[in-house]
Amino acid sequence: MKRLYLIQKAIYTSMAFIIIFSNIYAQNFNKANILWKGKKVEAVDGEIVIKVKVGVNYNSFINKLHSIHFIILDKPDKNNIARLRIPNDISIVDAIEKVQQTNMVTDVTPIGVTHAYATTNDPYFGNQWGLQAINAPSAWDLTEGSSSDTIGILDSGIPFENNTLSHPDLQDANRILIGNDYTGDGLGIEDGLGHGTHVAGIISAETNNNTGVSGTTWNSIIYIEKVFTYYNVGNSIWFYRAVDDAISHHVKVINYSGGQDYPDTYLEQAVQDAQKNNVIIVASSGNLPVVTSWPAAYSTSYNNVIAVSATDKNDIIANFSSTGSYVTVSAPGVHVFSTLPNYPFYLQDLEPLNENYDYMDGTSMSAPYVSGLASLVLSMNPTLTPAQVRQLIEQNADDLGATGFDNQYGYGRINALKTVAM
């Protein structure tokens, strides 16, 4: 079993100006362990995120922050969200309290640190028990997906060497669009971690090409956004900006096989923006049974979010899978076979993984099946709203565990044939 419990530290590039306006925030950063709302959590050190009240005078806002020694790193954007550097001599929690006292903001939180949660003629199709479990081959008799649908994959990148897509099962430039690298880890869109490659293969590996593995959807476009570094570290700022960019590129489904253990302003605004633009967000439930993961947990408040737990070959909930009332459905997540970079990558330092293809575990592997299924559903009926797609997936899942909805399987393990046949 190969599970992803990866924590690494990064180095933050220091800022020297009173007001700094950045568009990409592609720097590394330090992490801090803080007590937030009674829980120990990871946050970006020395920074907070705020939402400025509508109607606040901008010059007054600047002057007030300057008087209490805060630095504006990102000015308020279209959603009135801004990023601040806090004074060196106070804690993140104390800084939040100080900003709240200005009466100029509607929301102020730490910035969350995120981590990734880890029939055809394709020769390795027999290794892909997950596709058989969700009845994908029969679903393909009805639809193989559509090039009119784009899935945004917010992860650690994709195999990319010599300025070109390099994996034999992920090299069709007509189906794989390259987005932004928000991490600044020096590799560009190249996947140095390995996680994003595995996820991309589950969703949309080139299929029926006499090579490697099959994807859940054969024809959908995938749009690659890099939000996890080589060392499996990300933050909610990168997620927020990647979601905004994915929306601007007309994606219909976003796969996010990662998360953090508390909500923050960036995460929720990204979910709200996706909802306003009829975009589905499929998120892993997490790999720690007693820890709630966000943005997956927004599934209870926003009907465009689908939270996915992990099952094994016997349709039993994985012992590592996070569970709770926010779980929407479950999908295969144990011993899942998919693509990996065709060059050395960081996960090989932690587990004995092969290049090109291998097995991995995690709710990170479960979410891509649901993203692929959502795209198959939209290929049958592109007029469906995110809420309607989610409802179809829920209603046609195979009920497992306690009868009806339960906190482990949600509405059940997904069934692709039953869902697309409706």
Image: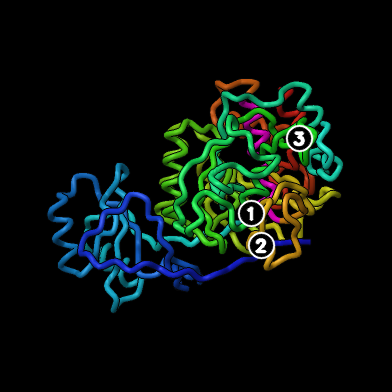
Disc number placed over residue 415 in the picture, else none = 3
| Magenta span main SS | helix
Which residue is at a point 59% across and 59% down the rendered structure image?
292
State the separation of the CA atoms marked 2 and 1: 8 Å
Badge 3 amino acid: Asn
Q: Which residue is mark 2?
A: 347
Say which of 91 and 205 sits in front.
Answer: 205
Residue to which mark 1 is pinned: 195
The part of the chain drawn in magenta is: 362-378
For label 3, count other residues whose C-alpha is less than 10 Å away and answer few (under 14), some (14-19) or many (20+): many
Say which element carries label 3: loop
Q: Position of residue 255 (x, y in %)?
A: 58, 43
Residue 339 vs 173, above or below: the answer is below
Mark found first going from the N terminus, 2 or 1? 1
Residue 239 among those drawn in magenta: no
Q: CA distance from mark 3 to mark 1?
A: 25 Å
Disc 2 to disc 1: CB gap under 8 Å: yes
Residue 405 in the image, given as x and y percentages of width and height: 70, 44
Pick whichever, 344 or 148, lies toward us: 344
Residue type of the residue flagged with mark 2? Leu
Q: Disc 3 vs disc 1: Cβ atoms closer than 8 Å?
A: no
The amino acid marked with disc number 1 is His
